Every structure is written in C-alpha cells, then in structure tokens.
Amino acid sequence: MISVAIDGPSGAGKSSLARRLAADLGYTYVDTGAMYRAIGLYTRRAGQNTKDAAAVEALLPRIHLDIRLQDGEQHILLNGEDVTRAVRAEDIGMAASDVSAHPAVRAFLLDTQRDLAASRNVLMDGRDIGTVVLPNATVKIYLTATPEARAARRRAELVAKGQDADFDTVLADIRQRDYQDTHRAVAPLRQAEDAVLVDTSDIGIEESFARLKQVVLSRI
C-alpha cells in the first residue's frame, strides 16, 4: 500500500489540497483533523472543558466514530450522526487543538488511522502523520505558509461565507493555534526529518497543487 503523509500548521491548505490530490491519484483521503474535531464537538456538546484531560478522557467510552467514504470523500459519523459540516465551525477548530493534546485522545484514534493506511492507498493529512501516525509513509510532505498568508486566506474564506472577520483577530487565533500545536507535550507539530518542505506563502492554489503532485509522483 502507498501512503502519503501531509503535515503542517492550521490554515496551510492541507485539507483542500490533500482532498483534491487524493482524488487525482485515486487514493483514499483521510482527514485526521476531522476526527479530532468530532471529539472536540462532542466534548463541547457535553458541556465539558476541552482543556481538561481527565474530563475528555472520561467521555471517550461514549464516543463512536465511523468513517464513511462517499465518492472518495471522507464523511465523519459521530455516534451515527454525520457531523462532516458541523465539525468545520470556527470554534471547533480550537476545541480540536485542545483535545488533540491529550494522550488518551491520540491513542483512541491512532489504531483507526493506521488500519486505514494498512488496507488501501491513502493520503492522510494532520499534525503528526509523518512523525507518529505513519512514520514509514511512502511520501512525507510538510506543507506550510507564513501566519500572515494563512490569516489572509482564512479571512477571505470567512468573508465569502458572509461572516465578519477581522484580520488581526484571525491572525491572533492562528498564532495561538500554532503555539498550542508546536508546544504540546504529546506529538507536537514538527517537520519530519525526511519530509519535503512545501511553502505556499507566495503561490496560489493551482501552483501549490502542482507542486504537491510533483513531489508525490517523484517518490512513488
């Protein structure tokens, strides 16, 4: 089986580019971030503090996650409910960052992620795919961009959805997320030693896609 691991900070375009690249290559796209978002969503709905490791761990036995692949796209089912759209809410991103710092949550999801990679060709994106989840991935890519570039893109997305978005606020959120992801005790965000760095700060979506595809095809 061929596995492609794409890691990088929030807002770097991992999900959109990875989803498109997986479809182009005929691989199964696995959005691991959506799994953490689902746990963050459940924790919020339960009225618990997402930063409280003990409280989150106590909820895990009540959580059943399923992954349904429809036309090559991953849908997340949380206790039977399709929450693919719900987990994309802005506040759930920070909740996902909180719960992903808890060892019990990472252990809870690790087997599911590895089983997917063992049974099919996959393209998986997240924060620690190449370093922890799939350390022997066929191809590893670290996709990044400056905080300012990522904030500008995120603000544009929010405005396009009709939501008010202040650039400085979005930038502050991204920097806070980066700090949390790179400083957590368990599996912090970092570039794997054998990962190819792709910086999209000054290039558009089409050039970014072409660059990623070139990296993958040159290594499989």
Image (spheres, grey):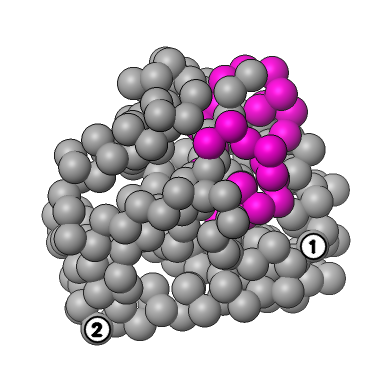
Percent coordinates x, y for residue 124 in the rendering:
54, 37
> Quick check: 6 above or below 103?
above
Q: Left or right of 88: which side holds 5?
A: right
Q: Judge whether residue 117 is colored magenta.
A: yes
Examine the structure image and report whether residue 138 is included in the region drawn in magenta: yes
3, above or below 189, in the image: above
Along the line of sight, which residue is nearer the eye, 131 or 119? 131
Name the residue beneath numbered marker 1: 103
Could you say which is closer to the camera, residue 64 or residue 14? 14
- Residue 88 visible: no
What percent of the width, then of the height, locates residue 15?
A: 40, 44
The part of the chain drawn in magenta is 114-139
Residue 13 percent coordinates (x, y): 33, 51
Q: Which residue is mark 2?
A: 168
- Amino acid type of the residue that numbered disc 2 sits on in the rendered structure: Asp
As measured in the structure, the alpha-carbon distance from the residue carrying label 2 to the one carrying label 1 is 32 Å
Tell me if residue 181 comes above or below residue 216 in the rendering.
below
Q: Position of residue 79 (x, y in %)?
A: 68, 37
* Figure label count: 2
- Are the two marked residues, 2 and 1, in contact with CB atoms closer than 8 angstroms? no
Q: Name the kind of residue labelled 1 in the image.
A: Pro
Kindly state the secondary structure of the residue where label 2 is placed: helix
Along the line of sight, which residue is nearer the eye, 1 or 90? 1
